[in-house]
Image (spheres, grey):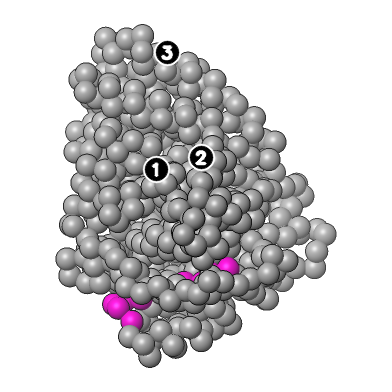
Amino acid sequence: MTQIPRRSPSVVMRLDRLGAMHQCRLSFMRQLTRRMAREGWRIWRARFDIDDRGVGRAVYVAQGPERSYALACFAHDLPADQRSDRVIADAWDATFTLCDGIPNEATLDRLQANVPLQEAGRITQSELTLSRANRSARLWDTVIEKLAAGVQPSAKQLTDVGYLMRTTAVYGSGKFGSADRELIADRPEMAAPFQAEMLTVYLIRCFVRDLVNHMAQSVGGPKAVKLDPKIAKTLGIGNSTGLGMAPFVVNHPVLFNNWIAAREEAIARVRSQPAATQDQIDCLRKCLAAARTEAEHWHTSDTEQTSRIATLRSDLAILTDWVDQGAWTRPMPWDALMRDATEHLDAEAQELLASLILEPFPDLVDPLTETMSDTASHDFVFEAGMPVAAAMALLQRSFGWTKDIDWNDKSAIARLWYVSAEKLEPRLGERFDEPIEPYEQPLSPARDAAYALGILANCPPEQPLYAVLADHPKLRGTLQRAQLTGQSPYSEIQDNTISAHMRPIDMLRAKLSFFGATRFDPRSDRWLRISMFAGAPYPEDLSVDGSDRWIYGRADL
């Protein structure tokens, strides 16, 4: 039992707090590498039919205890002027699909006819993901030129950028014909969220390393050298993510609750520890030192995030002093450290510390990964006979804070979410500047809840909901959501998602932090770049000892 309670949803579920979250032991990338190492997965390159121009196809196989998965890779010779991170792009440097099993020649031919087309093509239930990537305009040619000439590229330059290729999408869960989540959810290796997508990116990273070495060899011949393994390990896969991901945390409230609840429970368990051992303190100290180094390499052109990073660096110096100067003699020192951070440091440092204190406690934290999926939502049945009073109590629990919002103020409803007809992707528009209100999507639960509370307040407390819905059928979606999330305290964002002041990238960052992403680089308030698997061991180095804290750049922590 924890002595320190979980933090309140009123604190955690604000967008400015969600937009300051960092990866932690529960992140999906780290779950994957721990599993692969623990179960002794065998990962190899099954074929690599790439020509001197970097065009062709390759297959990478990941074999677990019961099943094999294979990444089919298609490399293209894309002119620089066609390279774009935007979702409206129709050509890429490389395209990929993760196969359920090892594809034969006929399957590869079918995939080669479809995967490079992405949305315009189709895959089947035999494929789990669909992805594409572009080369780094800053680094790709430079790295190949250096390696071809027999010298290593600048380690600092590569570390500052962090990747050689950047994905612009990793689709799964039934999109474009891929296997539905339900088809693989009962597999142990796929039970945790987004494991197929994380495996896809992990194998893409292997392909990118091999491709750059191959192209350097093609250019330089006998003079060429391979990328230094130490440099290669620092590189991840970049990713550009935009508004298409933002509504996920609104549309999957129970799943998102389970992620946040697992993290908050882990934090509460650590804060409740009565003392700290020297080994635990040393672990925190090493992870903190690595986090400070990573913060020095974290750069962005976004003015607000640049300011937050500068404050974070200062806060981490203060935190280091606390850790080094013996903050461990106080009762419940982990809680005391968190309380100090809450009082004296900004949200970025508070949330980073919340992640860091989990590192010394794998036995307390790691079992919580089993609670992060959502297996209940599919069995939900709306309780139409629920009394009005009970429904109001559910709504008040998650949305009582909306009483402070004036919904007649245009700034409170300035934006709306709709779906792009061209790419079938979520978009955010300006309600009073664009003729798009007829296409609004139900992605403003706070406004809808406030409206429902207003209607219910004028109904008899004992009246059943079916009687209310007879006169107000538009309330059904909101009331269903209230019942579904009634036992999920972290299911609802406690901010207005259609306000003029809302930053969608806060929702993106919250989700990506659970992926395990680092180096959040906002390009506007609507899309950002990240790095994935930077520091992770490649298959030949995957071991139990080195499969976990690679995120901090040290396999021996």
Q: Residues within 10 Å of mark 1 (few under 14, many from 20)?
A: few
Residue at image position (58%, 24%) is: 311
Residue at figure coordinates x 23%, y 38% from the top left:
362
Instruction: Look at the picture and state if 428 lies above or below 306.
Output: below
The residue to which callout 2 is attached is 155
State the extent of the magenta-drawn residues as a range. 93-103
- Mark 3 → mark 2, Cα distance in angstroms: 30 Å
In contact (CB < 8 Å): disc 2 and disc 1: yes
The residue tagged 1 is 230
Give the crowd class for mark 3: few <14, some 14-19, many >=20 residues within 10 Å: few
Q: Residue at x 24, y 25 (%)?
A: 280
- In the image, taking residue 77 as reference, residue 438 lies left or right, namely right
Residue 148 highlighted magenta (yes or no): no
Q: Secondary structure at mark 2?
A: helix
Label of residue 195 in the image: none
Q: Earlier in the sequence, mark 3 or mark 1?
A: 1
Rendered-image quadrant of the N terminus: top left
Residues marked 3 and 1 touching at CB (< 8 Å): no
The residue type indicated by label 2 comes to Ala
